[in-house]
Image: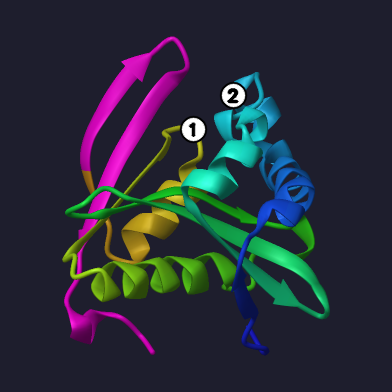
Amino acid sequence: MDETPALRRAVADDVAAVRVLTREAYAKWVPVIGREPLPMRADYDEAVRRHRVDLAFLDGGLAALIETIDKGDHLVIENVAVAPAFQGHGLGRYLLAHAERLALELGYGEVRLYTNKMFEANVRLYLAVGYRIDREETSALGVTVYMSKSILPCDVAA
């Protein structure tokens, strides 16, 4: 990534853009799992109101977002979505590191996330940046991979 994205927290006026970006980012997974992934159907009015959704801007436009949930003793990454034009350029890694910094600011030593096992590229990325697989659960929606990463202040890039 040549340029550092400008980050800002989403507000109610951003809901439509959050929904569009997420749908575009996850569209590639529809043929892989045979249905729309859950983030494509999420209630983003509710998500922006109840969770932290940080928007990443590049080249004057919305390029990616990360949605996190404060669980009181750890941070959960609920959604990472990167616009197709910006995929493969390090934005996902950048946003994961951002979430780790947020967790540290909250005094937490762990970040958790989950993904569909069929999203193999995502699982590989999470493993490559230090997440471990905690468990897998099978449901009517497929196999969900639950992952976590222990973090210390020295682990998070500035």
How dense is the environment of label 1, judged by Cα within 10 Å: few (below 14), some, or many (20 and up)?
some
State the SS at label 2.
helix
| Left or right of 76 in this view: 41 | right
- Whether residue 23 is visible: yes
Give whichever of 102, 1 is nearer the camera. 102
Looking at the image, do the residues carrying marks 1 and 2 touch, with CB atoms under 8 Å apart? yes
Image quadrant in which you'd find residue 91: bottom right
Give the residue at mark 1. 118
Asked which colour scheme the image uses, the reply is: rainbow
The C terminus appears in which quarter of the rendering? bottom left
Q: Residue furthest top?
A: 140
| Left or right of 87 in this view: 126 | left
Please tell me the numbered disc located at residue 148.
none
> From the viewer's perspective, is residue 24 above or below residue 11?
above
Ranked by sequence position, the earlier of labels 1 and 2 is: 2
Give whichever of 32, 2 is nearer the camera. 2
Q: CA distance from mark 1 to mark 2?
A: 7 Å
How dense is the environment of label 2, judged by Cα within 10 Å: few (below 14), some, or many (20 and up)?
some
Q: Is residue 154 magenta?
A: yes
Going by the numbered disc 2, the residue's amino acid type is Ile
- Whether residue 87 is visible: no
| Left or right of 46 in this view: 122 | left
State the SS at label 1.
loop
The residue segment tinted magenta is 134-158
Please state the horizontal and vertical placement of residue 67, each as a whole percent of the image: 50, 53
Give the residue at mark 2. 33
- Picture residue at 60% right of the left edge, 32% below the top: 42
Please state the horizontal and vertical placement of residue 12, each as a whole percent of the image: 69, 52
Please state the horizontal and vertical placement of residue 148, each as a whole percent of the image: 24, 52
Going by the numbered disc 1, the residue's amino acid type is Met
